[in-house]
């Protein structure tokens, strides 16, 4: 008889947990996974996937207008939000089923309920059943930060956006990060009057200043309003449902929806971690080493609950490395250097490596090259919107330290360029590559 019911018990069926469970099972481990909501986690159920589908849906607003400039006879179009919302949810359900099938075909036992830790080798489920495991992996993700000012409960988080009954006519978005800018672009395209309220003076603080400024300029030209250095005092609901949002600048914003996009906090509470002495950071993040192991040797954690880099592909790599190392005799670790990222704003931003400010601080002498251009399609469409690509190189070696882009398809273009940046290629090596004409991406090898 084996000592434990399972070799691995995963708590949380999101990107990191599912990958770890699947790979561990493929290495022959006896694996169980518990998820109290829907398999797939934030990315599949209420994050990257449905959001990207809404971004596609929103992009038609401009495409349909542009089409007329390209000779198409486009009748006046009407946008049907419930149609898109339901199609997106159907796709989410399809993906959730795929996740379930993938786990089941690899023999992973799925418990559709909440789980907690009783001791370093025992998981207790909501139904009271207890399961012993040689190793327990916590992959419970993160949840939206919600503020506590009076009336804040009248606001919603990104979780609720995907289920809106209707497109809000007036939308106030709190925050200026990923989620705020992405939903501002989406709902502005669907016809909402969007106002972004930020506590500071900058959007997307971790991105290069030049692309941030370009996004703000374009967002403003599309009708998105920004209120900087502004905090909330309270919200009241008027008899017709309108939200009266009082801010510290003494104004009252009227809106149909208040969306909080103020960051995400690790889901580490209520799992019994403190009782077992598992070290937690002030943010609630589970503290782990480079192998995703906590200070309790049989307990590991991956993904957003560890708050290393809150991105799906990183959680997937962490889960994969953990499973290969612990169950496949294939030890390896995640390399966090040069992780590309994107903001699916309108237009999108994509970046890899150091911003100009970071490069100057770290390397001293740097060179900066830019391509500031109006994409060919925008010219014929009579759209003034300009794209901006920026390359930051080491002043001595010419190595590309960072690449920052805003413009149509920037994330699609940057993924390929990120390979070159990760491989530490130089600007000269970029320039040795013949341009692929006519494209937007050719600007990458033509920057001055
Ligand atoms: P972000 O960290 O991107 O942005 C948070 C925003 O909220 C910032 O503007 C921040 O301001 C502001 N903020 C934080 N706390 C407060 C507060 N107490 N009062 C007022 N403002 C506050 O978080 P998001 O919620 O947008 O996204 C969460 C995470 O999810 C991201 O960090 C990212 O890792 C991931 N994500 C990734 C996406 C992608 O890859 N495309 C898309 C969506 C989410 P300040 O700048 O002043 O700190």
Image: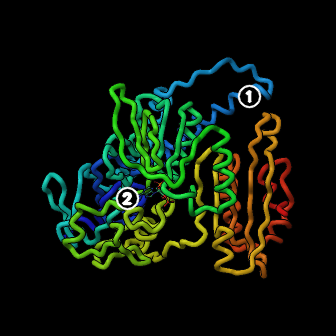
- Name the mark on residue 141: 2
Identity of the residue drawn at 43% across and 36% down:
257
Query: If the image is split into quadrants, where does the N terminus sit?
Result: bottom left
Q: Position of residue 33 (x, y in %)?
A: 30, 57
Q: What element carries label 2?
A: loop
Q: Which mark is residue 407?
A: none
The residue most toward the top is 75
- Where 30 sits versus 163, above or below? below
- Does 90 sit left or right of 150 as displayed? right
Q: Mark 1 points at which residue?
A: 67
List x then y, in percent, for residue 317.
48, 65
Q: Which of marks 2 and 1 is nearer the N terminus?
A: 1
Pick the residue in front: 379 or 153: 153
- CB atoms of marks 2 and 1 within 8 Å: no
The answer to whether one can see residue 248 in this image is yes
User: Callout 2: few (<14), some (14-19), or many (20+) C-alpha neighbours within 10 Å?
Assistant: many
The residue at the point 44 percent across, 52 percent down is 231
């Amino acid at each position: 008889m084996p000592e434990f019911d399972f070799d691995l018990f995963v708590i949380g069926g999101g990107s990191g947990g599912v990958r770890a469970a699947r790979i561990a099972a493929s290495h022959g481990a006896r694996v169980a996974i518990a998820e109290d909501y829907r398999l797939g986690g934030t990315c599949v159920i209420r994050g990257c996937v449905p959001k990207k589908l809404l971004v596609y849906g929103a992009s038609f607003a401009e495409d349909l207008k542009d089409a007329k400039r390209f000779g198409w006879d486009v009748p006046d179009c009407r946008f049907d939000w419930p149609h898109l919302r339901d199609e997106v949810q159907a796709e989410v359900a399809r993906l959730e089923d795929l996740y379930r099938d993938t786990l089941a075909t690899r023999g992973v036992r799925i418990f559709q309920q909440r789980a907690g830790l009783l001791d370093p080798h025992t998981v207790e489920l909501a139904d009271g059943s207890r399961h012993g495991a040689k190793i327990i992996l916590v992959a419970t993700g993160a949840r939206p930060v919600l503020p506590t000012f009076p009336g804040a409960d009248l606001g919603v988080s990104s979780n609720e956006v995907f289920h809106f009954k209707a497109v809000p006519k007036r939308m106030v978005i709190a925050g200026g990060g990923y989620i705020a800018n992405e939903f501002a672009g989406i709902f502005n395209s669907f016809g909402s009057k969007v106002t972004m309220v930020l506590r500071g003076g900058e959007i997307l603080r971790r991105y290069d200043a030049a692309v941030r400024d370009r996004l703000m300029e374009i967002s403003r030209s599309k009708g998105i309003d920004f209120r900087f250095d502004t905090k909330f005092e309270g919200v009241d609901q008027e008899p017709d449902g309108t939200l009266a949002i009082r801010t510290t600048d003494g104004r009252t914003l009227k809106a149909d929806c208040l969306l909080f996009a103020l960051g995400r906090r690790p889901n580490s509470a209520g799992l019994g971690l403190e009782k077992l002495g598992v070290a937690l950071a002030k943010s609630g993040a589970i503290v782990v080493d480079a192998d995703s192991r906590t200070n309790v040797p049989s307990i590991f954690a991956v993904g957003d609950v560890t708050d290393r880099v809150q991105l799906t592909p990183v959680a997937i790599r962490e889960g994969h490395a953990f499973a290969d190392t612990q169950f496949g005799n294939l030890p390896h670790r995640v390399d966090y250097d040069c992780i590309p990222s994107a903001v699916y704003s309108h237009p999108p931003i994509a970046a890899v490596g150091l911003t100009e400010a970071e490069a100057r601080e770290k390397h001293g002498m740097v060179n900066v090259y830019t391509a500031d251009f109006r994409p060919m399609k925008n010219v014929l469409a009579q759209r003034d919107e300009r794209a901006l690509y920026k390359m930051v190189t080491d002043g001595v070696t010419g190595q590309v330290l960072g690449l920052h882009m805003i413009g149509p398809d920037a994330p699609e273009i940057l993924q390929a360029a990120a390979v070159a940046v990760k491989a530490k290629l130089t600007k000269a090596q970029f320039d040795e590559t013949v341009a692929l004409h006519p494209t937007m991406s050719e600007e990458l090898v033509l920057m001055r």
